[in-house]
């Protein structure tokens, strides 16, 4: 059974380990690289978790961390879904959907009417996951990637209170 757990600043070693696992497993899926996160110690990891208003969660299966996701307040716009990852052993079992739903609930509680994300354009499995959960591509230009040509694909989902 999958359990979701909200991560606090005191959980920084857990967040560090799952973030590193995500970057090692799927380097093609993130703008950050594993090498970027080997620098710095506890302070850097705590700082990531101390962003005011942020929401970070991990998914556990039989006590092992098998996924992660974060929600960050929007900078003048809707909040953002970030850092979604599910371990290979847990893919196809609804973990990604549960993580997305948890961030949506956080955003709704904060009064948001939409949730935004940016995904690398070649990440077809992630795009399919987001589309299955109601996200649609926008015309908004995403951040420019390291190649200086390609941009992230920006997607958004309208949120409704049930």
Image: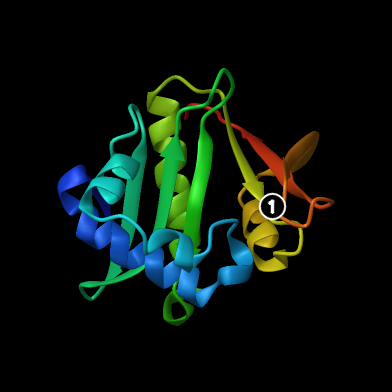
**Residue drawn 33% across the image and 51% down it:** 57
Q: Residue furthest left?
A: 10
Q: Is 67 rendered above or below residue 5?
A: below
**Residue drawn 45% across the image and 68% down it:** 22
Q: Which residue is mark 1?
A: 131
Residue 12 lies left or right of residue 160; in this view the side is: left
Q: Residue furthest bottom?
A: 89
Q: Is residue 93 visible?
A: no
Between residue 47 and residue 3, name the one nearer to us.
Answer: 47
Residue 145 lies left or right of residue 41; in this view the side is: right
**Residue drawn 66% across the image and 37% down it:** 156
**Residue drawn 57% across the image and 26% down it:** 78
Residue 98 lies left or right of residue 12; in this view the side is: right
Q: Residue furthest front?
A: 39
> For residue 50, what is the image quadrant?
top left
Q: Is 88 rendered above or below residue 45?
A: below
The location of residue 144, given as percent across then percent down, is 74, 45
The location of residue 77, given as percent across then percent down, is 59, 21
The location of residue 141, given as percent across then percent down, is 79, 36
- Crowding around mark 1 (Cα neighbors within 10 Å: few <14, some 14 to 19, many 20+) is some
């Amino acid at each position: 059974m999958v359990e979701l757990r909200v991560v606090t600043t005191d959980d920084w070693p857990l967040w560090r380990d799952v973030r590193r696992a995500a970057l090692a497993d799927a380097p093609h899926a993130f703008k950050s690289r594993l090498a970027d996160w080997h620098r710095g110690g506890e302070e850097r990891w705590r700082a990531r978790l101390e962003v005011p208003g942020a929401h970070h969660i991990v998914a556990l299966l039989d006590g092992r961390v098998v996924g992660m996701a974060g929600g960050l307040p929007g900078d003048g716009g809707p909040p953002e879904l970030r850092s979604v990852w599910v371990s290979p052993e847990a893919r196809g079992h609804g973990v990604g959907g549960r993580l997305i739903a948890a961030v949506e609930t956080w955003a709704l509680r904060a009064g948001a009417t939409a949730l935004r994300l940016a995904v690398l354009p070649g990440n077809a499995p992630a795009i399919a996951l987001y589309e299955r959960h109601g996200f649609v591509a926008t015309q908004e230009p995403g951040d420019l990637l390291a190649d200086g040509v390609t941009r992230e694909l920006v997607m958004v989902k309208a949120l409704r209170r049930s």
